[in-house]
Amino acid sequence: MKTVIMSDNMHTIDDYRRLYDESVTNGTDFWRRMADTFDWHTIAGHSPRFGHNFDTSSAPIDVHFMSGSQTNVCHNLIDRNIALGFGSRIAYHWVGHEFELNMALTYSQLRDQVCRFANVLKGLGLKKGDTIINYTPDLIQTVISMLAAIRLGVVYANTFPGYSAQCLAQRMLDLKCKVLITSDVYYSYKRFNDLKQYSDQAINICRQNNHEIKARIFIKYLSDGNYSPNISDYNSDLDPRLDHWWHDLIEKADTECPPVWVDSEDPLFVIFSSGSTGKQKAIVHSSGGFMVMSALVFKHAFNYTDGDVVYCSGCLGWITGQFSHVFGSLANAATVVLSEGSQTYPTPGRWWRIIDEYKVNIFYVNPTDIRNLRSFGDQYPNDYPMADLKVIGVVGETIDGETWKWLYEVIGRQRCPIVNTYFQSETGCPIIFPIPGVIPIKVGSVSLPFFGVQPVIIDENGHELEGEGNGTLLIKTAFPSIARTLYGDYNLYEKTYFHKYPNYYFTGDGMY
C-alpha cells in the first residue's frame, strides 16, 4: 500500500547530505522516486523526468518536470487521500472572527463540496485554461473554489480582500478573468469592508478596458445572524445578468465531477507579487512540480507525522498560506486549522487559544506578528498549555534574537524547534531551512538548502563566494516548484530573473 508521501529515512546530517547530493547530481532518479507516490493518469516515457535551461544565450528559459505526463492536483490532494483510507479524517477546522463561528470538513465532505463547485464552474462555461479570481477572506469556500478550479484545469489567483478595487481590476485584466468569487463583506480589525462595492468598481474598470467577466459569485458573509452590523448599510442588490449567490448554486450541484487530467507543466495557479520592481507580477506555478515539491518540503520542514494538525498565520492571498493551508498539508493528508480575523481579537491570546483548543502540532508564523504579540506580554500565551505543539516555523523575514528567544521559551516551552525558512512567491515553497532533528538549528539562520536547490552567493564582482561572506543570493539550477513564467509576459519573466546574472535565477535578496 502506498504511503502518503514517499520519503527516504533521514535521521542524521549524513543522511541529509547523502540525499541532497543525489538530488543535485542525479535529479532525474531522485524526483522520479518522489513523484511515484502520486497518482498519474499517464506517464510519458519519451522525455526526461526533470530538466532546465537557465542560459538565455542558447535558448529560452525552460524548466520541465515530467512534461508529457498527466495528473490532476485536486485528485491527488483529496481523492487519493480518501482512497488511502483518510476519508473520515478532518481536512479543515475553520474558525471565524468570533470563536463560536466554526465548522469542520472531513476529506470526504471536502470532496463533495469541491465537486459541487467544480460543476458550478462547468455550468458557467469554464474549461481548462480559463481563469478565475478569489477576492475573499480566509473562508472554507475559498479553499473549495481553489480546489474546484484545479479539478477542472482552470487557473485561479487569490487576491487579499484588503486590496483596492483598482488593484483587483488590474489583476482581472492581466488574467482575462472569467469569473470573480467574492463575498458581500468581510470583517477585519473591528470594521466591515464592503467587498461588493469594491468589486463593483473593479468590474466597471474592466468594462472601461473592454473586458467583461462571465459571472460574479457571492459568498454570503452576513448570514444566519453571524454578525450584527446595519446590514442595510451594505448594497446587496445583485445584477441578475451577472451575479449569483454561492449557496444557491452549490446546493443544486452534483457531488460527482471527474477530474480533468492536465499535463504536468500546465499552469496550476497564479500568485501576484510586486517584489523589488513595485509592479504586479503574475507568477505562474506548474501542476506536477509544485505538487511534488510542496508535499516533500512540508513533510520535512515541519517534521510532519501522520495525523498532525497544522496552523499557519498567513492568509490564502499569500503564497505562505496556500502552501501550508492547501498544497503541502493536503498532500500529506494533514488536518488544517484555517482562521480569519485579527490576531488580537477578542484578546491578544487568540492564536494561543486556537493552538490549544485545536491541538495544533505545527505552527507557521511571520516574525512581525510574533513581535506584535510579544509586546502584550507573557500572560496571554501562559493562559494556554499548547501541549501538542511540536514544531514552530517562521517565514517572511529575518527573525531577531529576542523574538526567537520569546518564541522558543514562551510559545514553544523550550521543546519546539524553531524552523527558520527562506521562501519566495517565485519558489512556491520554502527552499532553505534546517530540517528539525537532522540539521542543527542556529538562531537567525535559514541553514542548508532543501533537495534539488543549489544556492550560491555572488560578490559585487560576480564571483561565487566560498565559505562565509556577504553578497547576492542566486540559485544555480532549477527545482520542481520554481515559477515557470509570468502570465502573458515571458519577456518580463526572463528580464526580471535571468538577465542580470546569466545562467542563474536571481532572487533579488542578499545573504550573509
Image (cartoon, rainbow, N blue to C red):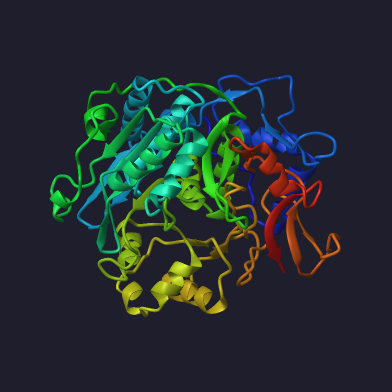
The answer to whether residue 183 is above or below residue 442 is above
Q: Position of residue 262 (x, y in %)?
A: 55, 24
Q: Position of residue 89 (x, y in %)?
A: 35, 40
Q: Is residue 266 rendered to the left or right of residue 493?
A: left
> Who is closer to the viewer here, 490 or 453?
490
Choose top left, top right, bottom left or bottom right for residue 358: bottom left
Q: At 68% from the left edge and 57% from the top edge, which residue is drawn?
A: 508
| Count of numbered tags | 0
Furthest toward the front, the residue is 208
Residue 454, how many percent across, how many down?
Answer: 75, 51
Of residue 454 and residue 183, the one placed in the foreground of this image is 183
- Foreground residue among 431 and 132: 132
Q: Nearer the viewer, residue 106 or 474?
A: 474
Instruction: Work out whether residue 334 can be spotted.
Output: no
The image quadrant where one finds the C terminus is: bottom right
Q: Is residue 294 shown above or below 268?
A: below
Q: Where is residue 164 in the image (x, y as percent from the top left)?
A: 40, 52
Residue occupying the point 67% across, 26% down: 67
**Residue 277 visible in the picture:** yes
Left or right, 188 with reference to 503: left
Q: In this view, does 114 lie to the left or right of 283?
A: left
Q: Which residue is drawn at 58% across and 63% down?
A: 420
